[in-house]
Amino acid sequence: QKEVEQNSGPLSVPEGAIASLNCTYSDRGSQSFFWYRQYSGKSPELIMSIYSNGDKEDGRFTAQLNKASQYVSLLIRDSQPSDSATYLCAVRNNFNKFYFGSGTKLNVKP
Amino acid sequence: EAQVTQNPRYLITVTGKKLTVTCSQNMNHEYMSWYRQDPGLGLRQIYYSMNVEVTDKGDVPEGYKVSRKEKRNFPLILESPSPNQTSLYFCASSSASGGNEQFFGPGTRLTVL
């Protein structure tokens, strides 16, 4: 079982719609949770971090964490074609090791 | 400008020829890390360092070495590269305080023939 699991996609949404990206993790001791965006050929760029249960909003992005279900999600409201990228879920465990999911490819169609 | 730099950005080499990929950060971060990214496997942590002279193995450390003699630098060493180490490599750094949000370098694309 992988430490962090994501649906590889592609996830296709029309421009202006809400994109919902999901991630599950296996280590209950995980401390911190991150969403990164990666454009093809580029390095990952941090979008959101979340550390406690509930929702965290930043502009068009909302991260949701449910530690009991070991589930993290990212909602992108009013999706734009420029949001088309691969989204990586990352988890930091108790020993400061980071685990990344293999990413979900998002296509936002104009 | 706050940044993580890596060199070289592209490297083609042959099996067995020792190489070093450098990583440097100017943010005074304690935590530094190396990853490799392969299609379908995502980012996998090779080694990480909590501070100077403190390093530890990540998920896929075999065939790699690291050192942390200075806070800003964290070189990745491949003593005897093999074709299965052909990959895209990223260095990242973060502060030890707070949430450990990592900032990534631009990547090094390595091909081992």
Image (cartoon, coloured by chain):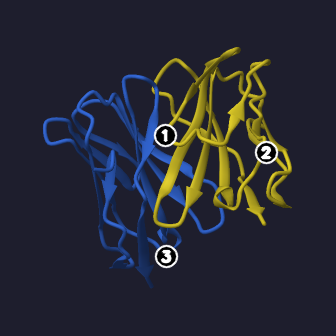
Chain colours: A blue, B yellow
Q: Note whether A51 is above or below B59 in the view shown.
A: above
Query: What chain does badge 2 belong to?
Result: B
Q: Amino acid at mark 3?
A: Pro
Residue nearer the viewer, B15 or A18? B15
Counting from the top left corner in percent of width and height, residue B42 is at 48, 57
Name the residue furthest bottom: A110
Subunit that carries the residue with mark 3: A
The amino acid pointed to by label 2 is Gln
**Horizontal and vertical percent for residue B46?**
58, 40
* Label whose residue precedes the other's in the sequence (2 or 1): 2
The alpha-carbon separation of the residues under discs 2 and 1 comes to 21 Å
Judging depth in this view, the residue of A96 and A12 nearest the camera is A96
* Secondary structure of residue under mark 2: strand
> Which class describes the residues within 10 Å of circle 3: few (<14), some (14-19), or many (20+)?
some
Foreground label between 1 and 3: 1
Residue at the image point whose x is 43% and y is 59% from the top: A102
Crowd around label 1: few <14 · some 14–19 · many ≥20 (10 Å): few
| Contact check, label 1 and label 3, Cβ < 8 Å | no
- Identified by mark 1, the residue type is Asp
Is label 2 on the same chain as label 1?
yes
Disc nearest the viewer among 3 and 2: 2
Which residue is tagged 1? Answer: B59
Q: Who's the residue at 40% across and 53% down the image? A: A101
**Image quadrant assignment for residue A65:** top left
In the drawing, what numbered circle is on residue A81?
3
Q: Is disc 1 placed on a helix, strand or loop?
A: loop
